[in-house]
Amino acid sequence: MSDWSLRLARPEDAEVMPSIERAASALFASDPQLAELDLSESLKPDRLRRLIRKGHCLVSHVESEAAGFLACEPFGRELHIWEMDVHPRFQRRGIGAGLVRACAIDARNSGFKAVTLTTFRDVEWNGPFYTRIGFEEVTALDAHPRLAGELAVEADQGLPVERRCAMILFLD
């Protein structure tokens, strides 16, 4: 039996989500190439509340404490994950995988054809993690202009282009 639970996010969850994101992003400091990047910027509660109102964001709890979240948004026939974080105190319990799998189930049940995201292709808890769950790297970005645009915005924000990728999980 799991010691955590998950549910659809509620507007009041938007207040705690940024602190989880900041705590999780601190782990990037262990990568010498990423340590110099300012990854302390997090999604703002107002934006999170807008995403939550669209009905597909999730939050996980360990007992009564928020442990992780997944914030996503519909784009046509795809559901795009903007952010998925688990507080470092609660990592390695399957919470992140549970959030992503629940997102995929929700997306499939809601009629979406795919789940998308952008991430670091070579950071163990990013690209390889999503690959293990069934995501594939999008190599033909010309066929996915929205994802190509997201990667361009990230490059403008200073993220290393050579380490970023778009990924997609096709739903049956």
Image (cartoon, helix red, strand yellow):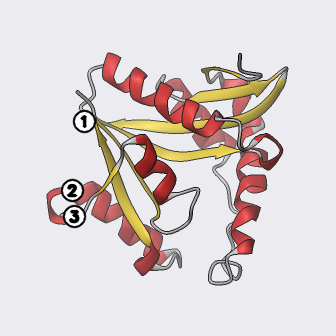
Nearest to N terminus: mark 1 or mark 3:
1
The image quadrant of residue 124 is: bottom right
Residue 30 percent across, percent down from the top left = 73, 73
Nearest to N terminus: mark 2 or mark 1:
1
Indicate left or right for 56 with 61 as reference. left
At label 1, the amino acid type is: Gly
Q: Nearer the viewer, residue 78 or 92?
A: 92
Give me the residue at 76% from left, 36% from top.
15
Circle 2 sits in a helix, a strand or a loop, which is it? loop
Circle 3 sits in a helix, a strand or a loop, which is it? helix
Which quadrant is home to the C terminus? top left
What residue would you read off at disc 1?
Answer: 76
Q: Nearer the viewer, residue 128 or 167?
A: 128
At label 2, the amino acid type is: His
Which quadrant is home to the N terminus? top right
What residue would you read off at disc 2?
Answer: 144
Indicate left or right for 46 with 74 as reference. right
Task: Assess disc 1: are there few (<14), some (14-19) or many (≥20) residues with their C-alpha within 10 Å of its C-alpha.
Answer: few
Give residue 141's mark: 3
Circle 1 sits in a helix, a strand or a loop, which is it? loop
Question: Considering only vertical position in the picture, is 156 above or below 27?
Answer: below
Distance from the alpha carbon under mark 1 to that under mark 3: 17 Å
